[in-house]
């Protein structure tokens, strides 16, 4: 070719620069030398705002603990949060903004059944994983979706546990009250299936419109049926209105929980949780903050397993490698055709002072 020494050096230098620039161009969105940036689209305003803020505070407590000890393969985990108002019409636009403008690596800890169902087509098209959607709708689990990794148990698992508990105490006259949306209908289906398996049917089914607390008709219908128990699948504010509407008949409320009791250190995961939030003013023990903490632990484990040069596809494979992974008393399981997440379900009672007791 007739190259002299100078030309050879120039050629080698050019080749090195080409490799470096190519490597930079091929870097995954949301990953740089110092950070892995995650995106969150959730209702920081609207009817679930309180729960979303608690979920997020618990997750950040875990991320901060990890970051303080070197992060994940030397990178800090950063959470970029945007508000979708708990409105499924807004959610796709917010998710697109996180992916296209904020250039996040993966999505994390969204909230609600209709909003998550609205988000998934965007995620699937962009091939961006979502870890920890805070909903137990069966659409999150079955059929398994490649880029979706629920952490909490399904509503069907929760309602099966509730029905089993009621039947074990001799209760068989059961009414159902639910929100008239995909969340409420999914919980209703789970309840009906669980009751049918035991040869039972609800004495009455009543509902309320999504986004409202207009529960008077439902209260009247259920009170008229004189049930021994009512299973509620509803958002918080409507549930409170319903219980108040029942008056004296509304006492003895039990709540299914999908994370361990967060007010004591009885398990390794709750011990770790309390150590992480000690001295913090932005997070307090609650079931929601505990759920966010657990979801963050799953996300970080996935990032670790994805290696020092993570890609979205490596994250998917890393999460799918988790088989009965012990998080500290709570197991999580995924696979190529499995999106089980955890199966931890507990039942608590709200006493007259408004406190959860076990």
Image (spheres, rainbow, N blue to C red):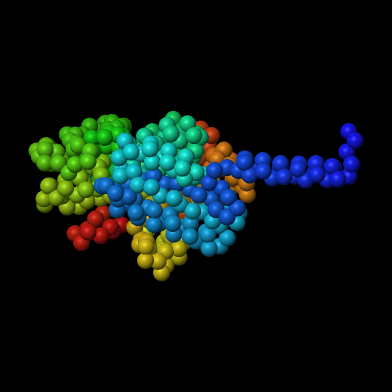
Give the left or right position of residue 115, taking residue 5 as reference: left
Quarter placement of the C terminus: bottom left
Residue visible at 53% across and 59% down in the picture: 67
Please state which of residues 337 and 147 is positioned toward the viewer in this rendering: 147
Please state which of residues 358 and 353 is positioned toward the viewer in this rendering: 353
Q: Where does residue 179 sit, x and y in percent of width and height?
A: 23, 38
Residue visible at 47% across and 39% down in the picture: 100
Give the left or right position of residue 122, taking residue 309 as reference: left
Residue visible at 49% across and 61% down in the picture: 65
Residue visible at 38% across and 38% down in the picture: 93
Q: Is residue 323 visible?
A: no
Give the left or right position of residue 224, taking residue 232 as reference: left
Q: Where does residue 76 sit, x and y in percent of width and height?
A: 54, 56
Q: Where does residue 154 sit, x and y in percent of width and height?
A: 37, 40
Q: Is residue 233 visible?
A: yes
297 lies above or below 222: below
Quarter placement of the N terminus: top right
Q: Where does residue 217 sit, x and y in percent of width and height?
A: 11, 38
For residue 135, which quarter of the picture?
top left
Give the left or right position of residue 328, taking residue 169 as reference: right
Q: How many marks?
A: 0
Please state which of residues 61 and 275 is positioned toward the viewer in this rendering: 61
């Amino acid at each position: 070719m007739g190259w002299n020494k100078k030309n050879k050096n120039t050629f080698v230098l050019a080749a090195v620069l080409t490799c470096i620039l190519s490597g930079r161009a091929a870097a995954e969105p949301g990953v740089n030398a110092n950070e892995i940036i995650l995106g969150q689209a959730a209702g920081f305003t609207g009817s679930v705002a309180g729960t979303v803020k608690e979920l997020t505070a618990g997750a950040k407590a875990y991320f901060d603990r990890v970051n303080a000890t070197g992060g994940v393969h030397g990178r800090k985990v950063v959470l970029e949060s945007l508000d979708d108002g708990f409105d499924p019409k807004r959610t796709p636009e917010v998710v697109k903004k996180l992916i296209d403008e904020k250039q996040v690596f993966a999505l994390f800890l969204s909230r609600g059944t209709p909003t998550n169902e609205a988000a998934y087509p965007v995620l699937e098209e962009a091939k961006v994983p979502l870890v920890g959607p805070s909903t137990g709708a069966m659409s999150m689990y079955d059929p398994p979706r490649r880029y979706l990794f629920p952490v909490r148990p399904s509503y069907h698992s929760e309602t099966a546990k509730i029905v089993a508990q009621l039947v074990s105490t001799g209760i068989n006259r059961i009414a159902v009250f639910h929100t008239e949306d995909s969340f409420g209908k999914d919980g209703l289906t789970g309840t009906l299936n669980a009751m049918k398996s035991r040869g039972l049917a609800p004495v009455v089914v009543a509902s309320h419109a999504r986004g409202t607390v207009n529960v008077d008709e439902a209260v009247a219908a259920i009170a008229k049926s004189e049930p021994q128990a009512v299973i509620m699948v509803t958002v918080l504010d409507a549930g409170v209105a319903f219980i108040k509407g029942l008056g004296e008949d509304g006492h003895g409320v039990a709540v299914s929980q999908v994370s361990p009791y967060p007010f004591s250190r009885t398990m390794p995961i709750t011990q770790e949780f309390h150590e992480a939030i000690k001295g913090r003013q932005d997070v307090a023990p609650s079931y929601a903050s505990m759920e966010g903490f657990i979801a963050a632990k799953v996300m970080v484990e996935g990032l670790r397993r994805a290696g020092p040069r993570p890609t979205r596809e490596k994250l998917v494979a890393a999460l799918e490698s988790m088989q009965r992974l012990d998080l500290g008393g709570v197991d999580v399981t995924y696979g190529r055709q499995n999106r089980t997440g955890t199966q931890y379900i507990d039942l608590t009672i709200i006493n007259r002072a408004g406190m959860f007791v076990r």
